[in-house]
Amino acid sequence: MNFLQNQSFWRMSMTTALAAAMLAGCGGSSSGSSSDSDDTAELPPNVRQTQSGQVEGVEQGAVRMFKGIPFAKPPVGDLRFAPPQPADAWEGVLDASEFGNSCPQTGSAFNGFTDSLDEDCLYLNVYTPTEGENHPVMVWIHGGAFITGSGGESYEPSRLVDQGVVVVTMNYRLGVLGFLPAAGLPEGNGQFGLLDQQLALKWVQDNIDAFGGDAGNVTIFGESAGGHSVLSQLVSAGAGTGSEGLFHKAIVQSGAYQPTQVPQPVGEVLIGSPVVAALGCSDAGDVAACLRDESVTTAAILEAQGDLWFNPTWGQGMLPYSIQAALSQAGGAAFPQGVPVMTGNNLHEGRLFLALDEISATLAGAPDPVDTLEEYQAEVGALLASDPRGLDADQVAADYLNTDSSPLATPPVTDPAAADRFTLALASIQTSWRFACNQLAQVGSLSGQGVPTFGYWFTDEDAPSLFGPELTPMLSFDLGAAHALEIQYVLNSEATMRARGASDEQLALSERMIDHWVQFARYGDPSSADGTATWPDYAAGSQLVELTPEIPASESLVNVSEAAAAHNCAYWANPPLAPDQI
Protein backbone atom coordinates (compact mmCIF):
# COMPACT_ATOMS: atom_id res chain seq x y z
CA MET A 1 0.00 0.00 0.00
CA ASN A 2 1.39 3.36 -1.04
CA PHE A 3 0.96 5.87 1.77
CA LEU A 4 2.26 8.82 -0.21
CA GLN A 5 0.68 8.88 -3.64
CA ASN A 6 -2.99 9.29 -2.85
CA GLN A 7 -3.81 12.26 -5.06
CA SER A 8 -7.28 12.56 -3.57
CA PHE A 9 -5.71 13.29 -0.19
CA TRP A 10 -3.29 15.77 -1.73
CA ARG A 11 -6.18 17.68 -3.29
CA MET A 12 -8.05 17.54 0.01
CA SER A 13 -5.28 18.67 2.27
CA MET A 14 -3.74 21.29 0.02
CA THR A 15 -6.91 23.31 0.01
CA THR A 16 -6.86 24.05 3.73
CA ALA A 17 -4.38 26.91 3.46
CA LEU A 18 -5.94 28.07 0.20
CA ALA A 19 -9.22 28.45 2.03
CA ALA A 20 -7.45 30.07 4.96
CA ALA A 21 -5.96 32.59 2.54
CA MET A 22 -9.45 33.54 1.59
CA LEU A 23 -10.15 34.20 5.24
CA ALA A 24 -8.17 37.05 4.84
CA GLY A 25 19.40 24.16 17.95
CA CYS A 26 16.15 24.54 19.87
CA GLY A 27 16.54 24.21 23.62
CA GLY A 28 14.34 24.83 26.65
CA SER A 29 12.73 28.07 27.60
CA SER A 30 14.65 31.20 28.41
CA SER A 31 13.46 33.37 31.24
CA GLY A 32 15.58 36.39 30.38
CA SER A 33 14.40 39.48 28.56
CA SER A 34 16.20 40.68 25.47
CA SER A 35 16.61 44.03 27.21
CA ASP A 36 16.01 45.32 30.69
CA SER A 37 12.88 47.30 31.49
CA ASP A 38 14.72 50.62 31.75
CA ASP A 39 16.06 50.29 28.18
CA THR A 40 12.63 49.28 26.89
CA ALA A 41 10.97 52.24 28.63
CA GLU A 42 13.28 54.64 26.80
CA LEU A 43 12.31 53.36 23.36
CA PRO A 44 9.63 55.02 21.21
CA PRO A 45 6.17 53.43 21.66
CA ASN A 46 6.36 51.32 18.49
CA VAL A 47 9.96 50.15 18.92
CA ARG A 48 10.94 46.98 20.75
CA GLN A 49 14.33 45.50 21.58
CA THR A 50 14.88 41.86 20.61
CA GLN A 51 18.01 39.80 21.14
CA SER A 52 18.95 40.42 17.50
CA GLY A 53 18.19 44.14 17.39
CA GLN A 54 15.44 46.72 17.51
CA VAL A 55 12.21 46.47 15.50
CA GLU A 56 9.70 49.20 14.75
CA GLY A 57 6.10 48.22 14.17
CA VAL A 58 2.89 50.11 13.53
CA GLU A 59 -0.09 50.92 15.71
CA GLN A 60 -3.67 50.32 14.61
CA GLY A 61 -6.31 51.12 17.20
CA ALA A 62 -5.47 49.25 20.39
CA VAL A 63 -3.12 46.83 18.59
CA ARG A 64 0.59 47.15 17.82
CA MET A 65 1.78 45.01 14.92
CA PHE A 66 5.37 43.97 14.32
CA LYS A 67 5.60 42.13 11.00
CA GLY A 68 8.35 40.33 9.17
CA ILE A 69 10.72 39.77 12.10
CA PRO A 70 13.43 37.24 11.13
CA PHE A 71 13.70 34.46 13.69
CA ALA A 72 16.23 32.40 11.71
CA LYS A 73 19.02 32.89 9.25
CA PRO A 74 17.81 32.59 5.66
CA PRO A 75 17.71 28.81 4.97
CA VAL A 76 19.83 29.11 1.83
CA GLY A 77 23.28 27.91 0.77
CA ASP A 78 24.63 25.54 3.40
CA LEU A 79 21.42 26.00 5.44
CA ARG A 80 19.15 24.70 2.68
CA PHE A 81 17.99 21.20 3.72
CA ALA A 82 19.44 21.73 7.19
CA PRO A 83 18.07 22.55 10.65
CA PRO A 84 17.40 26.28 11.08
CA GLN A 85 19.86 28.57 12.86
CA PRO A 86 18.96 31.67 14.93
CA ALA A 87 18.87 34.96 13.05
CA ASP A 88 21.95 37.16 12.93
CA ALA A 89 21.93 40.47 14.77
CA TRP A 90 21.34 43.67 12.81
CA GLU A 91 22.32 47.30 13.24
CA GLY A 92 19.82 50.09 13.60
CA VAL A 93 16.06 49.67 13.72
CA LEU A 94 14.38 47.04 11.54
CA ASP A 95 11.25 48.20 9.74
CA ALA A 96 8.57 45.75 10.92
CA SER A 97 5.61 47.23 9.05
CA GLU A 98 5.36 44.62 6.26
CA PHE A 99 5.08 40.84 6.19
CA GLY A 100 8.12 38.82 5.18
CA ASN A 101 8.28 36.54 2.14
CA SER A 102 6.03 33.51 2.09
CA CYS A 103 7.97 30.26 1.94
CA PRO A 104 8.31 28.73 -1.55
CA GLN A 105 5.08 27.29 -2.92
CA THR A 106 3.33 26.89 -6.22
CA GLY A 107 1.00 29.62 -7.44
CA SER A 108 -2.74 29.12 -7.47
CA ALA A 109 -6.00 30.97 -7.89
CA PHE A 110 -5.66 32.06 -4.27
CA ASN A 111 -2.29 33.79 -4.51
CA GLY A 112 -2.58 35.45 -7.89
CA PHE A 113 -1.22 32.44 -9.80
CA THR A 114 2.24 33.55 -8.74
CA ASP A 115 4.80 31.11 -7.39
CA SER A 116 6.56 32.10 -4.18
CA LEU A 117 10.23 31.52 -4.94
CA ASP A 118 12.22 33.32 -2.25
CA GLU A 119 13.75 30.83 0.20
CA ASP A 120 14.54 33.67 2.62
CA CYS A 121 11.19 33.23 4.36
CA LEU A 122 11.61 32.44 8.05
CA TYR A 123 9.78 35.39 9.55
CA LEU A 124 7.22 35.84 12.28
CA ASN A 125 4.70 38.52 13.22
CA VAL A 126 3.73 39.82 16.66
CA TYR A 127 0.40 41.47 17.51
CA THR A 128 0.26 42.98 20.98
CA PRO A 129 -2.01 45.21 23.08
CA THR A 130 -0.86 48.81 23.33
CA GLU A 131 -1.18 48.65 27.11
CA GLY A 132 -0.14 46.27 29.87
CA GLU A 133 2.37 43.45 30.24
CA ASN A 134 2.58 39.76 31.15
CA HIS A 135 -0.20 38.97 28.69
CA PRO A 136 -0.80 35.32 27.76
CA VAL A 137 0.74 34.46 24.40
CA MET A 138 -0.94 32.53 21.56
CA VAL A 139 1.27 31.26 18.72
CA TRP A 140 -0.61 30.36 15.52
CA ILE A 141 0.76 27.65 13.20
CA HIS A 142 -0.88 27.90 9.79
CA GLY A 143 -2.29 24.99 7.80
CA GLY A 144 -1.99 24.09 4.15
CA ALA A 145 -1.00 20.40 3.83
CA PHE A 146 2.61 21.38 4.57
CA ILE A 147 2.91 22.66 0.99
CA THR A 148 1.23 26.06 1.00
CA GLY A 149 0.20 28.96 3.24
CA SER A 150 1.92 31.51 5.47
CA GLY A 151 1.48 33.29 8.77
CA GLY A 152 0.82 36.60 7.02
CA GLU A 153 -2.23 38.55 5.94
CA SER A 154 -4.62 35.58 5.83
CA TYR A 155 -5.15 35.89 9.58
CA GLU A 156 -6.46 38.86 11.54
CA PRO A 157 -6.02 38.37 15.32
CA SER A 158 -7.17 41.81 16.48
CA ARG A 159 -10.14 40.51 18.48
CA LEU A 160 -7.88 38.12 20.40
CA VAL A 161 -5.52 41.00 21.12
CA ASP A 162 -8.47 43.09 22.30
CA GLN A 163 -8.96 40.47 25.02
CA GLY A 164 -5.44 41.04 26.35
CA VAL A 165 -3.53 38.38 24.41
CA VAL A 166 -0.26 38.67 22.48
CA VAL A 167 -0.58 36.73 19.21
CA VAL A 168 2.36 35.46 17.17
CA THR A 169 2.09 34.00 13.65
CA MET A 170 4.96 32.38 11.77
CA ASN A 171 6.20 31.00 8.49
CA TYR A 172 7.93 27.64 8.21
CA ARG A 173 9.50 25.79 5.29
CA LEU A 174 7.05 23.81 3.17
CA GLY A 175 7.01 20.89 0.76
CA VAL A 176 10.34 19.55 -0.43
CA LEU A 177 12.31 22.30 1.30
CA GLY A 178 10.67 21.67 4.65
CA PHE A 179 9.73 18.01 4.72
CA LEU A 180 11.88 16.03 2.26
CA PRO A 181 12.86 12.69 3.83
CA ALA A 182 16.10 11.74 2.06
CA ALA A 183 19.22 9.79 2.90
CA GLY A 184 22.30 11.98 2.88
CA LEU A 185 20.65 14.98 4.54
CA PRO A 186 21.26 16.03 8.17
CA GLU A 187 19.24 14.43 10.95
CA GLY A 188 15.81 15.96 11.12
CA ASN A 189 15.22 15.70 7.38
CA GLY A 190 11.53 15.17 6.80
CA GLN A 191 11.00 17.52 9.76
CA PHE A 192 12.87 20.76 8.94
CA GLY A 193 9.58 22.68 8.83
CA LEU A 194 8.75 21.47 12.34
CA LEU A 195 12.24 22.51 13.46
CA ASP A 196 11.51 25.97 12.04
CA GLN A 197 8.41 26.06 14.24
CA GLN A 198 10.52 25.07 17.25
CA LEU A 199 12.99 27.86 16.59
CA ALA A 200 10.14 30.37 16.30
CA LEU A 201 8.88 29.14 19.68
CA LYS A 202 12.39 29.54 21.09
CA TRP A 203 12.36 33.12 19.75
CA VAL A 204 9.12 33.69 21.64
CA GLN A 205 10.70 32.45 24.86
CA ASP A 206 13.68 34.76 24.40
CA ASN A 207 11.89 37.90 23.24
CA ILE A 208 8.17 38.02 23.90
CA ASP A 209 8.41 39.83 27.25
CA ALA A 210 9.66 42.89 25.34
CA PHE A 211 6.29 42.86 23.54
CA GLY A 212 4.23 42.61 26.74
CA GLY A 213 3.89 38.82 26.63
CA ASP A 214 4.43 36.24 29.34
CA ALA A 215 6.98 33.67 28.17
CA GLY A 216 5.76 31.38 30.94
CA ASN A 217 2.23 31.24 29.50
CA VAL A 218 2.40 30.30 25.81
CA THR A 219 -0.34 28.45 23.91
CA ILE A 220 0.31 26.96 20.47
CA PHE A 221 -2.69 26.58 18.20
CA GLY A 222 -3.23 25.63 14.58
CA GLU A 223 -5.70 24.21 12.08
CA SER A 224 -5.37 21.23 9.70
CA ALA A 225 -1.62 20.91 8.96
CA GLY A 226 -1.18 23.51 11.69
CA GLY A 227 -3.11 21.30 14.11
CA HIS A 228 -1.05 18.32 12.96
CA SER A 229 2.02 20.45 13.73
CA VAL A 230 0.70 21.15 17.23
CA LEU A 231 0.36 17.40 17.84
CA SER A 232 3.88 16.87 16.47
CA GLN A 233 5.27 19.50 18.83
CA LEU A 234 3.49 17.75 21.69
CA VAL A 235 5.16 14.46 20.72
CA SER A 236 8.52 16.21 20.61
CA ALA A 237 7.95 17.77 24.02
CA GLY A 238 6.96 14.42 25.51
CA ALA A 239 9.97 12.73 23.95
CA GLY A 240 12.40 15.39 25.12
CA THR A 241 13.50 16.20 21.57
CA GLY A 242 13.36 19.96 21.45
CA SER A 243 9.88 21.29 22.18
CA GLU A 244 9.84 20.84 25.94
CA GLY A 245 9.45 24.12 27.82
CA LEU A 246 8.58 26.10 24.69
CA PHE A 247 4.81 26.14 25.27
CA HIS A 248 2.35 25.41 28.04
CA LYS A 249 -1.01 24.73 26.37
CA ALA A 250 -2.11 23.45 22.95
CA ILE A 251 -5.18 23.82 20.70
CA VAL A 252 -5.68 21.37 17.82
CA GLN A 253 -8.25 22.46 15.21
CA SER A 254 -9.09 19.72 12.68
CA GLY A 255 -5.55 18.36 12.92
CA ALA A 256 -6.16 14.72 13.86
CA TYR A 257 -5.86 13.33 10.32
CA GLN A 258 -3.23 10.68 9.60
CA PRO A 259 -2.01 10.19 13.17
CA THR A 260 0.23 7.32 12.07
CA GLN A 261 2.26 9.71 9.91
CA VAL A 262 4.97 8.26 7.65
CA PRO A 263 7.97 6.22 8.84
CA GLN A 264 11.31 7.72 7.79
CA PRO A 265 12.41 4.72 5.65
CA VAL A 266 9.08 4.70 3.79
CA GLY A 267 9.33 8.42 3.16
CA GLU A 268 12.89 8.10 1.86
CA VAL A 269 11.84 5.44 -0.66
CA LEU A 270 8.53 6.85 -1.84
CA ILE A 271 9.25 10.59 -1.76
CA GLY A 272 12.92 11.20 -1.10
CA SER A 273 14.40 9.04 -3.83
CA PRO A 274 12.09 10.25 -6.64
CA VAL A 275 12.61 13.92 -5.73
CA VAL A 276 16.40 13.55 -5.42
CA ALA A 277 16.43 11.81 -8.80
CA ALA A 278 14.28 14.50 -10.41
CA LEU A 279 16.76 17.11 -9.19
CA GLY A 280 19.71 15.21 -10.68
CA CYS A 281 21.35 14.30 -7.38
CA SER A 282 20.87 10.53 -7.18
CA ASP A 283 24.44 9.72 -8.21
CA ALA A 284 26.08 12.55 -6.28
CA GLY A 285 28.69 11.53 -3.75
CA ASP A 286 27.31 14.21 -1.43
CA VAL A 287 23.55 14.43 -1.84
CA ALA A 288 23.21 17.41 0.49
CA ALA A 289 25.86 19.41 -1.39
CA CYS A 290 24.18 18.58 -4.69
CA LEU A 291 20.76 19.71 -3.48
CA ARG A 292 22.27 22.93 -2.15
CA ASP A 293 24.04 23.80 -5.40
CA GLU A 294 22.90 27.00 -7.09
CA SER A 295 22.02 25.01 -10.19
CA VAL A 296 19.17 23.39 -8.22
CA THR A 297 16.85 26.37 -8.35
CA THR A 298 13.79 26.98 -6.22
CA ALA A 299 11.65 26.67 -9.33
CA ALA A 300 13.21 23.29 -10.10
CA ILE A 301 12.46 22.13 -6.56
CA LEU A 302 8.81 23.13 -6.90
CA GLU A 303 8.64 21.37 -10.25
CA ALA A 304 10.12 18.21 -8.75
CA GLN A 305 7.62 18.46 -5.90
CA GLY A 306 4.75 18.34 -8.38
CA ASP A 307 1.61 16.85 -6.88
CA LEU A 308 3.33 15.11 -4.00
CA TRP A 309 1.94 15.77 -0.55
CA PHE A 310 3.88 15.88 2.69
CA ASN A 311 3.59 15.01 6.34
CA PRO A 312 6.42 14.99 8.85
CA THR A 313 8.20 11.64 8.97
CA TRP A 314 8.94 9.84 12.23
CA GLY A 315 11.69 7.55 13.48
CA GLN A 316 14.49 10.05 14.04
CA GLY A 317 15.11 13.68 14.91
CA MET A 318 12.36 15.37 16.91
CA LEU A 319 9.81 12.59 16.23
CA PRO A 320 11.10 9.25 17.50
CA TYR A 321 7.60 7.85 16.99
CA SER A 322 4.33 8.82 15.36
CA ILE A 323 1.49 10.76 16.94
CA GLN A 324 -0.55 7.57 17.23
CA ALA A 325 2.31 5.67 18.85
CA ALA A 326 2.85 8.52 21.30
CA LEU A 327 -0.82 8.46 22.24
CA SER A 328 -0.56 4.73 22.81
CA GLN A 329 2.44 4.85 25.12
CA ALA A 330 1.73 3.21 28.45
CA GLY A 331 1.32 5.81 31.16
CA GLY A 332 1.32 8.65 28.67
CA ALA A 333 5.08 9.11 28.85
CA ALA A 334 5.22 10.32 25.25
CA PHE A 335 2.94 13.32 25.84
CA PRO A 336 3.73 16.13 28.31
CA GLN A 337 1.07 15.66 30.97
CA GLY A 338 1.34 19.18 32.32
CA VAL A 339 0.19 20.67 28.98
CA PRO A 340 -3.62 20.97 28.68
CA VAL A 341 -4.98 20.21 25.21
CA MET A 342 -8.11 21.58 23.54
CA THR A 343 -9.09 19.72 20.36
CA GLY A 344 -12.03 19.59 17.98
CA ASN A 345 -13.39 19.10 14.51
CA ASN A 346 -16.16 20.39 12.24
CA LEU A 347 -19.41 18.64 11.32
CA HIS A 348 -18.80 18.71 7.55
CA GLU A 349 -15.00 18.81 7.15
CA GLY A 350 -14.97 17.03 3.80
CA ARG A 351 -17.23 19.46 1.97
CA LEU A 352 -14.58 22.15 1.60
CA PHE A 353 -12.36 19.99 -0.59
CA LEU A 354 -15.15 18.94 -2.90
CA ALA A 355 -16.27 22.57 -3.11
CA LEU A 356 -12.82 23.68 -4.20
CA ASP A 357 -12.68 20.89 -6.77
CA GLU A 358 -16.00 22.05 -8.20
CA ILE A 359 -14.98 25.71 -8.27
CA SER A 360 -11.61 24.95 -9.85
CA ALA A 361 -13.26 22.84 -12.54
CA THR A 362 -15.85 25.54 -13.25
CA LEU A 363 -13.22 28.27 -13.51
CA ALA A 364 -11.34 26.04 -15.94
CA GLY A 365 -14.45 25.88 -18.10
CA ALA A 366 -15.45 22.30 -17.33
CA PRO A 367 -17.83 22.06 -14.36
CA ASP A 368 -17.48 18.59 -12.87
CA PRO A 369 -19.55 17.78 -9.78
CA VAL A 370 -19.57 14.21 -8.49
CA ASP A 371 -22.92 13.36 -10.04
CA THR A 372 -22.72 9.77 -11.29
CA LEU A 373 -22.44 6.48 -9.44
CA GLU A 374 -19.31 5.53 -11.36
CA GLU A 375 -17.52 8.78 -10.54
CA TYR A 376 -18.59 8.52 -6.91
CA GLN A 377 -17.28 4.96 -6.59
CA ALA A 378 -13.97 5.94 -8.18
CA GLU A 379 -13.56 8.90 -5.83
CA VAL A 380 -14.31 6.75 -2.78
CA GLY A 381 -11.76 4.19 -3.96
CA ALA A 382 -9.08 6.86 -4.42
CA LEU A 383 -9.86 8.42 -1.04
CA LEU A 384 -9.66 5.16 0.93
CA ALA A 385 -6.65 3.71 -0.89
CA SER A 386 -4.27 5.03 1.77
CA ASP A 387 -5.96 3.15 4.65
CA PRO A 388 -3.50 0.41 5.67
CA ARG A 389 -6.36 -1.89 6.72
CA GLY A 390 -7.29 -2.53 3.08
CA LEU A 391 -10.90 -1.33 3.00
CA ASP A 392 -13.64 -2.54 0.70
CA ALA A 393 -14.20 0.83 -0.94
CA ASP A 394 -17.14 -0.38 -3.04
CA GLN A 395 -18.96 -1.58 0.06
CA VAL A 396 -18.24 1.68 1.89
CA ALA A 397 -19.55 3.64 -1.10
CA ALA A 398 -22.71 1.56 -1.14
CA ASP A 399 -23.22 1.84 2.62
CA TYR A 400 -23.05 5.64 2.48
CA LEU A 401 -25.79 5.68 -0.14
CA ASN A 402 -28.01 3.55 2.07
CA THR A 403 -31.59 4.82 2.07
CA ASP A 404 -33.00 2.78 4.94
CA SER A 405 -34.03 4.22 8.29
CA SER A 406 -30.46 4.79 9.50
CA PRO A 407 -28.27 5.85 6.58
CA LEU A 408 -24.64 6.66 7.30
CA ALA A 409 -24.17 9.93 5.45
CA THR A 410 -24.49 13.24 7.31
CA PRO A 411 -27.02 14.53 6.39
CA PRO A 412 -28.73 11.26 5.46
CA VAL A 413 -28.96 10.44 1.77
CA THR A 414 -32.68 9.78 1.71
CA ASP A 415 -33.58 10.96 -1.78
CA PRO A 416 -32.12 8.72 -4.52
CA ALA A 417 -32.91 11.45 -7.06
CA ALA A 418 -31.11 14.29 -5.26
CA ALA A 419 -28.46 15.91 -7.46
CA ASP A 420 -25.99 16.28 -4.60
CA ARG A 421 -26.37 12.79 -3.09
CA PHE A 422 -23.02 11.50 -4.34
CA THR A 423 -21.12 14.62 -3.31
CA LEU A 424 -22.61 14.68 0.18
CA ALA A 425 -21.97 10.97 0.70
CA LEU A 426 -18.36 11.34 -0.44
CA ALA A 427 -17.88 14.36 1.82
CA SER A 428 -19.35 12.43 4.77
CA ILE A 429 -16.90 9.58 4.24
CA GLN A 430 -14.00 12.00 4.15
CA THR A 431 -15.24 13.87 7.23
CA SER A 432 -15.69 10.82 9.43
CA TRP A 433 -12.92 8.51 8.23
CA ARG A 434 -10.16 11.09 8.02
CA PHE A 435 -11.02 13.73 10.61
CA ALA A 436 -13.80 13.24 13.13
CA CYS A 437 -13.29 9.67 14.32
CA ASN A 438 -9.53 10.18 14.64
CA GLN A 439 -10.16 13.32 16.69
CA LEU A 440 -12.71 11.70 18.97
CA ALA A 441 -10.34 8.79 19.57
CA GLN A 442 -7.54 11.23 20.40
CA VAL A 443 -9.71 13.06 22.95
CA GLY A 444 -10.22 9.79 24.77
CA SER A 445 -6.56 8.77 24.51
CA LEU A 446 -5.25 12.08 25.81
CA SER A 447 -7.72 12.19 28.68
CA GLY A 448 -7.02 8.57 29.52
CA GLN A 449 -3.33 9.40 29.91
CA GLY A 450 -4.07 12.09 32.47
CA VAL A 451 -3.68 15.04 30.09
CA PRO A 452 -6.22 17.83 30.86
CA THR A 453 -8.33 17.57 27.71
CA PHE A 454 -11.19 19.70 26.36
CA GLY A 455 -13.10 18.71 23.22
CA TYR A 456 -15.30 20.78 20.90
CA TRP A 457 -17.59 20.08 17.96
CA PHE A 458 -18.19 22.96 15.51
CA THR A 459 -21.63 22.47 13.92
CA ASP A 460 -22.71 25.85 12.50
CA GLU A 461 -24.30 24.55 9.29
CA ASP A 462 -24.80 28.11 7.98
CA ALA A 463 -21.26 29.32 8.61
CA PRO A 464 -20.31 32.26 6.36
CA SER A 465 -18.96 31.11 3.02
CA LEU A 466 -15.34 31.60 2.09
CA PHE A 467 -16.08 32.11 -1.55
CA GLY A 468 -18.26 35.20 -1.92
CA PRO A 469 -21.15 35.86 -4.28
CA GLU A 470 -19.12 35.17 -7.44
CA LEU A 471 -17.99 31.66 -6.57
CA THR A 472 -20.64 30.29 -4.21
CA PRO A 473 -23.23 29.81 -7.02
CA MET A 474 -20.78 27.39 -8.68
CA LEU A 475 -21.38 24.86 -5.92
CA SER A 476 -23.89 22.04 -6.30
CA PHE A 477 -24.32 21.69 -2.52
CA ASP A 478 -24.21 23.68 0.74
CA LEU A 479 -20.87 24.05 2.52
CA GLY A 480 -22.37 23.58 5.96
CA ALA A 481 -19.80 23.45 8.76
CA ALA A 482 -16.93 22.70 6.38
CA HIS A 483 -13.20 22.36 7.03
CA ALA A 484 -11.51 25.66 7.99
CA LEU A 485 -14.76 27.59 8.42
CA GLU A 486 -14.25 27.84 12.19
CA ILE A 487 -10.98 29.78 11.74
CA GLN A 488 -12.78 33.01 10.89
CA TYR A 489 -14.71 32.86 14.15
CA VAL A 490 -11.43 33.30 16.06
CA LEU A 491 -8.96 34.92 13.64
CA ASN A 492 -10.98 37.48 11.75
CA SER A 493 -12.60 40.85 12.35
CA GLU A 494 -16.27 41.48 12.93
CA ALA A 495 -16.34 43.66 9.82
CA THR A 496 -15.04 40.85 7.63
CA MET A 497 -17.54 38.39 9.03
CA ARG A 498 -20.36 40.90 8.50
CA ALA A 499 -19.23 41.30 4.90
CA ARG A 500 -19.52 37.53 4.46
CA GLY A 501 -23.08 37.59 5.73
CA ALA A 502 -22.63 36.59 9.37
CA SER A 503 -25.75 37.04 11.46
CA ASP A 504 -25.94 38.59 14.90
CA GLU A 505 -26.22 35.08 16.33
CA GLN A 506 -23.10 33.95 14.48
CA LEU A 507 -21.17 36.97 15.69
CA ALA A 508 -22.27 36.12 19.20
CA LEU A 509 -20.93 32.58 18.66
CA SER A 510 -17.70 34.08 17.37
CA GLU A 511 -17.33 36.21 20.51
CA ARG A 512 -18.05 33.15 22.61
CA MET A 513 -15.39 31.13 20.80
CA ILE A 514 -12.85 33.92 21.23
CA ASP A 515 -13.69 33.93 24.94
CA HIS A 516 -13.17 30.15 25.14
CA TRP A 517 -9.84 30.29 23.26
CA VAL A 518 -8.60 33.21 25.39
CA GLN A 519 -9.71 31.66 28.69
CA PHE A 520 -7.92 28.46 27.76
CA ALA A 521 -4.78 30.40 26.84
CA ARG A 522 -4.92 32.35 30.08
CA TYR A 523 -5.87 29.62 32.56
CA GLY A 524 -5.87 26.22 30.82
CA ASP A 525 -9.66 26.06 31.26
CA PRO A 526 -11.86 27.25 28.35
CA SER A 527 -14.97 27.84 30.49
CA SER A 528 -16.40 31.26 29.71
CA ALA A 529 -15.28 34.26 31.71
CA ASP A 530 -18.83 35.21 32.73
CA GLY A 531 -19.69 31.72 33.94
CA THR A 532 -22.47 31.12 31.39
CA ALA A 533 -20.68 28.23 29.66
CA THR A 534 -18.88 25.65 31.75
CA TRP A 535 -16.49 23.50 29.75
CA PRO A 536 -15.52 20.46 31.84
CA ASP A 537 -12.40 18.40 31.43
CA TYR A 538 -13.26 15.43 29.22
CA ALA A 539 -12.34 13.08 32.06
CA ALA A 540 -15.26 14.40 34.11
CA GLY A 541 -17.93 12.85 31.88
CA SER A 542 -16.84 12.38 28.24
CA GLN A 543 -18.53 15.59 27.14
CA LEU A 544 -17.78 17.99 24.29
CA VAL A 545 -18.85 21.60 23.81
CA GLU A 546 -20.96 22.01 20.69
CA LEU A 547 -20.25 25.33 18.98
CA THR A 548 -23.27 26.52 17.02
CA PRO A 549 -25.48 29.63 17.21
CA GLU A 550 -28.60 27.47 17.57
CA ILE A 551 -27.59 26.24 21.03
CA PRO A 552 -27.22 28.64 23.99
CA ALA A 553 -23.86 28.60 25.69
CA SER A 554 -25.40 27.26 28.86
CA GLU A 555 -26.77 24.20 26.98
CA SER A 556 -23.81 23.45 24.74
CA LEU A 557 -22.50 20.27 26.42
CA VAL A 558 -23.05 17.04 24.46
CA ASN A 559 -21.92 13.52 25.19
CA VAL A 560 -19.16 12.26 22.93
CA SER A 561 -21.43 9.40 21.93
CA GLU A 562 -23.66 11.87 20.05
CA ALA A 563 -20.77 13.13 17.93
CA ALA A 564 -19.46 9.60 17.44
CA ALA A 565 -22.88 8.47 16.22
CA ALA A 566 -23.21 11.42 13.85
CA HIS A 567 -19.86 10.50 12.33
CA ASN A 568 -20.44 6.72 12.30
CA CYS A 569 -17.33 6.04 14.35
CA ALA A 570 -18.51 2.55 15.34
CA TYR A 571 -18.66 1.76 11.61
CA TRP A 572 -15.13 3.07 11.05
CA ALA A 573 -13.79 1.16 14.03
CA ASN A 574 -14.75 -2.04 12.20
CA PRO A 575 -15.13 -1.10 8.52
CA PRO A 576 -15.74 -3.56 5.69
CA LEU A 577 -12.47 -5.00 4.45
CA ALA A 578 -11.56 -5.99 0.92
CA PRO A 579 -11.99 -9.74 0.31
CA ASP A 580 -8.23 -10.34 0.20
CA GLN A 581 -7.90 -8.70 3.67
CA ILE A 582 -10.45 -10.91 5.41
Image (cartoon, rainbow, N blue to C red):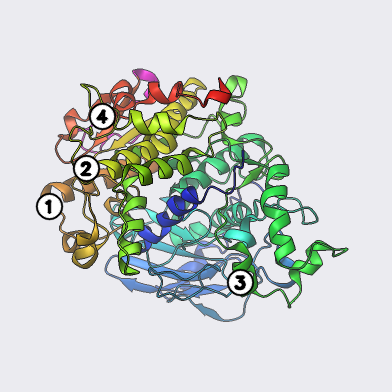
Q: Which residue is found at the position 25% from the left and 33% from the top?
A: 546
Q: Which residues are magenta?
A: 524-541
Whether residue 212 appears in magenta in the rendering, the answer is no
* Local SS, label 3: loop
Kindly identify the amino acid type of the residue bearing the numbered disc 1: Ser
- Residue at which label 4 appears: 534
Measured as percent of width and height from the top left, residue 530 is found at: 20, 37
* Local SS, label 1: loop
Kindly identify the amino acid type of the residue bearing the numbered disc 3: Glu
- Residue at which label 3 appears: 119
Q: Which residue is found at the position 57% from the left and 32% from the top?
A: 388
Measured as percent of width and height from the top left, residue 433 is found at: 42, 34
Q: Quadrant of the C terminus?
A: top right
Viewer-nearest of discs 1 and 2: 2
Which secondary structure is most common in the magenta stretch?
A: loop
The disc label shown at residue 503, or none: 1
Viewer-nearest of discs 4 and 1: 1
* Local SS, label 4: loop
Counting residues from the N terminus, which is met first, the one under dot 1 or under dot 3? 3
Q: Residue furthest bottom?
A: 92
**Label 3 to label 2: alpha-carbon separation:** 39 Å
Vertical placement of residue 18 versus 402, above or below: below
Whether residue 526 appears in magenta in the rendering, the answer is yes
Counting residues from the N terminus, which is met first, the one under dot 2 or under dot 4? 2
Viewer-nearest of discs 2 and 4: 2
Vertical placement of residue 75 versus 447, above or below: below
Viewer-nearest of discs 4 and 3: 3
Q: Which residue is found at the position 43% from the left and 50% from the top?
A: 12
Among the 4 quarters of the image, the one containing residue 512: top left
